[in-house]
Amino acid sequence: MARVKLDLPDTLPFTTEIVVRITDINYGGHVGNDAILAIIHEARIRFLQQYGFSEADIDGVGLIMTDSVIVYKSEGFYGDIISVEAGVKDITRSGCDFLFKLSNKENGNEIARAKTGIVFFDYHERKVKTTPPRFREAFSVHE
């Protein structure tokens, strides 16, 4: 079976730090795969907040995840500070991709890279919506 490959740009425009909690550790003694998805979720929320957005309200519409890809590079452990870089790519009529690079702040080792595909969604109407113009304006500079 072919391995998944995820190429990232050399730099991503947003960085935040997240400390690995004991609840992020699996029976192998390192950060679990489910925790990586939760960490990038937290980073996406922080990234959106910088622009006055939330996952539930970007000019009246929310986000819904359509897919995710995570490529694991090395282990993370309890108490590690993970530097999470984030960016937006491939803005379309109704969605985009969020890109993430997770590294150990202390030693610089890359822990994982990820992509989450999202579409804009009206939770009241239960329908996909077009990309809000303010979102496109805010993030198209990062592409």
Image (cartoon, grey):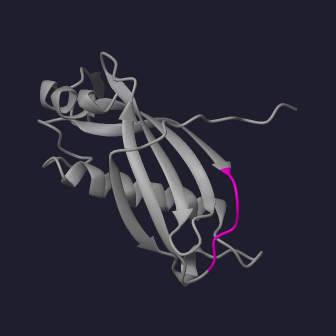
Q: Is residue 36 magenta?
A: no
Of residues 107 and 103, the one drawn nearer to the viewer in this rendering: 107
Residue visible at 55% across and 45% down in the picture: 114
Q: Which residues are magenta?
A: 72-77
Compared with residue 117, is residue 11 higher up or lower down, i.e. above or below? below
Q: Estimate the x, y position of residue 125 in percent, counting from the top left.
A: 22, 29
Q: Quadrant of residue 108?
A: bottom right
Quadrant, the C terminus: top left
Q: Estimate the x, y position of residue 19 in percent, counting from the top left.
A: 46, 76
Q: Is residue 104 left or right of residue 91?
A: right
Residue visible at 28% across and 58% down in the picture: 46
Q: Estimate the x, y position of residue 5 in percent, counting from the top left.
A: 69, 35
Residue visible at 60% across and 60% down in the picture: 34
Quadrant, the N terminus: top right
Compared with residue 93, is residue 84 higher up or lower down, i.e. above or below? below
Q: Is residue 40 left or right of residue 13?
A: right
Q: Is residue 138 left or right of residue 45?
A: left
